[in-house]
Image: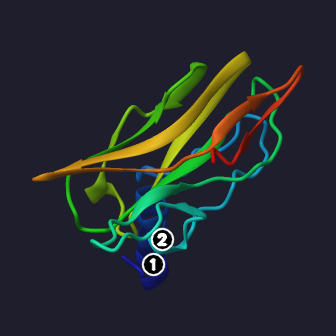
Amino acid sequence: MSLLRGCTAVAVAVVSLAGCGHDPSPSSSTGRTPHPAPTAAGDCNDLGTQRADGFVLAGTDWSNDVHAYDEPAVVYVCVQPGTGGRVSLETSGRGITITPRSRATSSSETGVLAFRVRVRQGATGTLTMRQQSPGATSGGPGPTVLAETNRWHFANAG
């Protein structure tokens, strides 16, 4: 086998393998770029407040971009990396669908895990994150869904 042919085979194999991974950042069905993921959980824009008894890194990261009802949005759940267990993004309202239902914290080295949120017209509710890890359960803030006539967006819950 020639050197050129061997290099070509390696390049094809690398490109093929790159396509096998799961991209944790759901993209919009409209082709619009989703809200970019924070590079670390501590950089998320909606974290729980620090308490005197210690701080559990827990919260979310989201944008207040306006979306059509057929357009999903990404909310990132933010947890301390390496804590184990699972995280979920939950809603207190109606007309809001979140996928996936939960994710293993081990699926992210940074502690930032993406969830896709879809909203139906007339929906109401607030999102919160929940982490269940060995020996502990924690939760953190998330946005409120504001549904309008032809569009929706997130806003601060507090």
Q: 10 Å neighbourhood of mark 1: few (<14), some, or many (≥20)?
A: few
Given the image, on which type of amino acid does mark 2 rest?
Ala
* Location of residue 90 in the rendering, given as x and y in whole percent from the top left corner: 45, 33
Q: 10 Å neighbourhood of mark 2: few (<14), some, or many (≥20)?
A: few
Q: Residue furthest left?
A: 135
In the rendered structure, the answer to whether residue 150 lies left or right of residue 72 reads right
For the residue labelled by badge 1, is the local secondary structure a helix, a strand or a loop? Answer: helix
Asked if residue 112 shows in the view, the reply is no
Q: Nearer the viewer, mark 2 or mark 1?
A: 2
Contact (Cβ within 8 Å) of mark 2 with mark 1:
yes
CA distance for labels 2 and 1: 6 Å
Q: Residue furthest right?
A: 149
In the rendered structure, the answer to whether residue 119 lies left or right of residue 4 reads right
Name the residue: 61% across, 64% down. 45
* Location of residue 106 in the rendering, given as x and y in whole percent from the top left corner: 26, 58
Q: Is residue 23 above or below residue 66?
A: below
Q: Residue 122 sits in which quadrant?
A: top right
Name the residue: 63% across, 48% down. 158
Way the structure is coloured: rainbow
Name the residue: 48% across, 71% down. 11
Q: Residue 56 sits in which quadrant?
A: bottom left
Q: Residue furthest bottom?
A: 3
In terms of depth relative to the viewer, which is nearer, 21 or 7?
A: 21
Q: Which mark is residue 39?
A: none
Quarter of the picture holding the N terminus: bottom left
Mark 2 sits on what residue?
A: 11
Q: Is residue 106 above or below residue 155?
A: below
Given the image, on which type of amino acid does mark 1 rest?
Cys
Q: Residue 81 sits in which quadrant?
A: bottom left
For the residue labelled by badge 2, is the local secondary structure a helix, a strand or a loop? Answer: helix
Mark 1 sits on what residue?
A: 7
